[in-house]
Image (spheres, grey):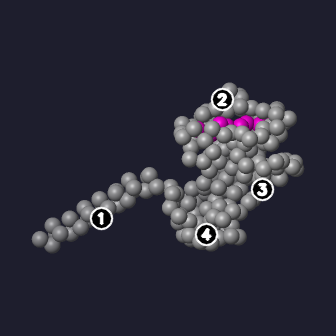
């Protein structure tokens, strides 16, 4: 009888472990940070409220081609924020265990299919619960090789510097992105 109970307990433990693994595949975990950008040993979960005085890390990447042009991506119409607007970056939340550059590289690959050979951090901005790290990268890809990520992006375009600066100052660019990128580009834009 004791042996049967032991086997049942072991089986329950295994089932519990498997069910946790199945559940965690659908849950996105983030590291929590303090306002000084230090990890604080607490996990945040996507779509759950972020506790007061805690922050999550978001990386965004301005993609430049070695010919000097810039990539802009049209946000999918189903996106909750800024549907149909163009953004001058690939980006998103850093997953648990990633640093800002690792998150930027992953997001670039996921959202565009591109790799870059040069990376530079260009800006940090802290809002009420988010630490934004902005990077610029340089790629030498075939411009037609950009891949669209279903549910994220629906179109893309490469712009020369003059066109890109006009885009940043247009109604088609996300306002917060205008502010962050104008610091790097050293220009004044209407936000």
Secondary structure found at label 4: loop
Secondary structure found at label 2: helix
**Which is in the foreground here, disc 1 or disc 2?**
2
Indicate the position of residue 57 as horizontal and vertical percent values. 64, 59
- Give me the C-alpha separation between circle 1 and circle 4: 33 Å
Q: Earlier in the sequence, mark 4 or mark 3?
A: 4
| In this rendering, position of residue 15 left or right of residue 143 | left
Q: Earlier in the sequence, mark 2 or mark 3?
A: 3
Residue 115 seen in this snapshot? no
Q: Earlier in the sequence, mark 4 or mark 2?
A: 4
Indicate the position of residue 95 as horizontal and vertical percent values. 57, 56
Please tell me which residue is depicted at 63% across the width and 64% down the height of the picture: 129
Q: Which residue is mark 3?
A: 123
Q: Which residue is mark 2?
A: 145
Checking the image for residue 33, the label placed there is none
Magenta part of the protein: which range?
69-76
Q: Which residue is mark 4?
A: 54
Furthest toward the left, the residue is 1
Checking the image for residue 13, the label placed there is 1
Residue 95 or residue 81, whichever sits in front: 81
Q: Earlier in the sequence, mark 1 or mark 2?
A: 1
Q: Residues within 10 Å of mark 3 (few under 14, many from 20)?
A: some
- Give me the C-alpha separation between circle 4 and circle 3: 20 Å
Q: Residues within 10 Å of mark 1 (few under 14, many from 20)?
A: few
Q: Earlier in the sequence, mark 1 or mark 4?
A: 1
């Amino acid at each position: 009888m004791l042996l049967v109970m032991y086997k049942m307990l072991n089986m329950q433990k295994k089932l519990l472990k498997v069910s946790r693994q199945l559940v965690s595949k659908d849950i996105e975990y983030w590291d929590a940070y303090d306002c000084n950008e230090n990890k604080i040993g607490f996990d945040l979960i996507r779509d759950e409220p972020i506790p007061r005085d805690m922050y999550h890390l978001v990386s965004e990447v301005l993609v430049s081609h070695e010919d000097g042009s810039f990539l802009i991506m049209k946000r999918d119409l189903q996106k909750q924020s800024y549907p149909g607007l163009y953004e001058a970056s690939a980006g998103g939340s850093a997953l648990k265990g990633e640093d800002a550059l690792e998150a930027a590289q992953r997001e670039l690959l996921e959202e565009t299919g591109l790799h870059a050979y040069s990376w530079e951090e260009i800006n940090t901005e802290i809002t009420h619960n988010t630490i934004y790290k902005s990077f610029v990268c340089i790629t030498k890809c075939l411009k037609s090789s950009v891949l669209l990520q279903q549910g994220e992006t629906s179109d893309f375009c490469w712009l020369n510097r003059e066109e890109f600066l006009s885009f940043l100052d247009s109604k088609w660019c996300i306002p917060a992105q205008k502010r962050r990128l104008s610091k790097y580009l050293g220009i004044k834009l209407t936000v």
